[in-house]
Image (cartoon, grey):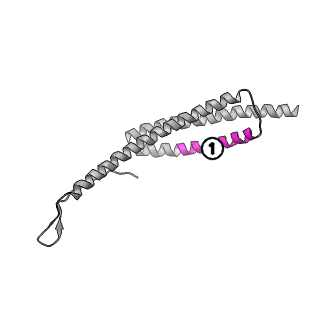
Amino acid sequence: MNNLATEGRTLSGFQGLASKIKASLNSLIESSKGLQKAIIKKDIDTIWKILADQQESINEFEKYNHLWGQLSAAGISSPGLPAVKDEINSDIKRLRETGKGNARLIMSFLSAIKRAMKHTGTDIASKTKVYGKSGKMHMKQVSLKVNCVG
């Protein structure tokens, strides 16, 4: 009798833990979509805020995932457990896809910045260098302005 009560509590523990994991994953997915919008808008302050919030959500998810592993290691199974695992895995897959999209977006921005810096550097380097009357090398003054934050 005591074993059935323990098993019932553990199964309800799986369900409660699964709902917390799903909520944590949904929070991460939504913040990743917000991060994508902030990256497109180039809103640095929002990007840093979202990244900090995501770190807290990831820590929470890892805590729940650790508890899930401990319950799974106990060897308790339930008929509804595979369906819950499939839902969690699909949410994880969505989160990965959103993260990969953000990574590609960031890499394209960094590539554009690199090309702009290379082009600007090439323009400055191609200027003819001439010695002046004082024996010093003179170049036409060229302004290189880079807007950077952080």
- The residue sitting at the right extreme is 1
> Residue at (29%, 52%) from the top-left corner?
118
Left or right, 8 with reference to 128: right
- The residue sitting at the left extreme is 133
- The residue sitting at the bottom extreme is 134
> Residue at (66%, 27%) from the top-left corner?
83
From the image, give the main secondary structure of the stretch colored magenta.
helix
Give whichever of 120, 59 is nearer the camera. Answer: 120
Query: Is any part of residue 144 visible from this angle?
Result: no
- 10 Å crowding of disc 1: few (<14), some (14-19), many (20+): some
Name the kind of residue labelled 1 in the image.
Glu
Residue 92, image x, y percentages: 57, 36
Asked whether residue 59 is drawn in magenta, I would say yes
Residue 19, compared with residue 45, is above or below; it is above
> Residue at (66%, 30%) from the top-left corner?
84
Residue 6, compared with residue 114, is above or below; it is above
Element on which disc 1 rests: helix
Residue 138, compared with residue 25, is above or below; it is below
Residue 37, image x, y percentages: 42, 36
Asked whether residue 63 is drawn in magenta, I would say yes
Give whichever of 8, 70 is nearer the camera. Answer: 70
Left or right, 71 with reference to 36: right
Q: What residue sits right under mark 1 in the picture? A: 62
Give whichever of 85, 41 is nearer the camera. Answer: 85
Residue 63, image x, y percentages: 65, 44
Left or right, 91 with reference to 39: right
Query: Is any part of residue 61 visible from this angle?
Result: yes
Q: Write the start and end of the magenta stretch as one range.
A: 53-73
Residue 12, image x, y percentages: 74, 31
